[in-house]
Amino acid sequence: MSVKLTSRQVGDVTVLDAAGRITLGEGASAFRDAIRDFAAKGNKKLLLNLSDVSYIDSSGIGEMVSGFTTVTNNGGQLKLVGLSKRVKDLLQITKLYTVFEVFDDEADAIRSFH
Amino acid sequence: MAIRPFGFTWLGGPLLFWMAWLKRGDMEKIQTTLDSALESVDKAESLVISEAGKLGFEEDEAHQIGMAIRECMVNAVVHGNRYSQNKKVHLDIERSATSLVVTIGDEGGGFDLNSVPDPLSPENLLRQSGRGFLLIRAFMDEVDVHPRAGGGTEVRLVKNKP
């Protein structure tokens, strides 16, 4: 199963709920396109919810980093919530914990934008 | 004692590959040749996770081994063979009582591991790519990259039973 991204608005924060696999191929490219679309629409506060993401490989990580750069260059913020232990481990190994703001709780993540 | 073949199959369809099972003492070996396609990445990952399970690795460790195989297969298919239909990926899986040894070979133009920028350097953290070998090394006990006989690159990965 490829990744599916849906969005919802919580105040001025756009929450992107991702589900499925973010791996090389269809999953990673769909993910990249979606993040760029939201950034292009002028969304400045993006929260990526990875609760239902079952698998991320290095290509998926690369797309997350690319999305972070795109959003940041547009003057916005991209933060993460709902990471599984496996995804947290990947961020530790790649030192991307120093790049992304990561939250366990969505309400805490939403508040952090204000 | 010579390795004794005890199984051989040829599977057709969109993903064409052959696979042979060999056995010597407590060591079992699977030799597979795969097309240079992303479907081969999934196939290789599934095969190795299955073998890791037989050796007694827990689910999380088997997942990590599978991910190392995925990253290595992606390198072979995408960067080594560049999706060429004329080039194959050679996957060997050896399962003994104490370890899992996986060898993945491509038929590409060769690979210099030193050419990959350190993905942990601050100036490289925001690069989109270049983290594959970092993950492979994190998840496997031994990683050896060398030229493959006949051309291309071969990577030998070892995971010892805990």
Image (tube, rainbow, N blue to C red):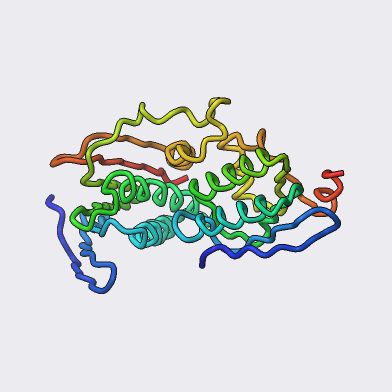
Q: Which percent across, then down, holds residue A51? A: 68, 59
Q: Is residue B152 left or right of residue B124?
A: left
x%, y% of residue B153?
Answer: 25, 40
Residue lying at 60% horizontally and 43% vertically, measured from the top left: A89
Furthest-front residue in this view: A41
User: Residue A102's quadrant in the figure?
Assistant: top right
Residue under the image location 24 percent in, 46 percent down: B106
Can you see residue B101? no
Residue at 75% in and 47% down:
A44
Height in image: A100 above or below B97?
Answer: above
Q: Quadrant of residue A71?
A: top right
Q: Nearer the viewer, residue B29 or B74?
A: B74
Viewer-proximal residue among B91 and B57: B91
Give the residue drawn at x 70%, y 48%: A80
A4 on left or right of B64? right
Q: Is any atom of residue B56 visible in this view? A: yes
Q: Position of residue B58 (x, y in %)?
A: 52, 55
Q: Quadrant of residue B22?
A: bottom left
Task: Point out residue A33 in the picture as x, y percentages from the top left corner.
Answer: 56, 56
Which residue is nearer to you in this view: B154 or A60?
A60
The number of callouts visible is 0
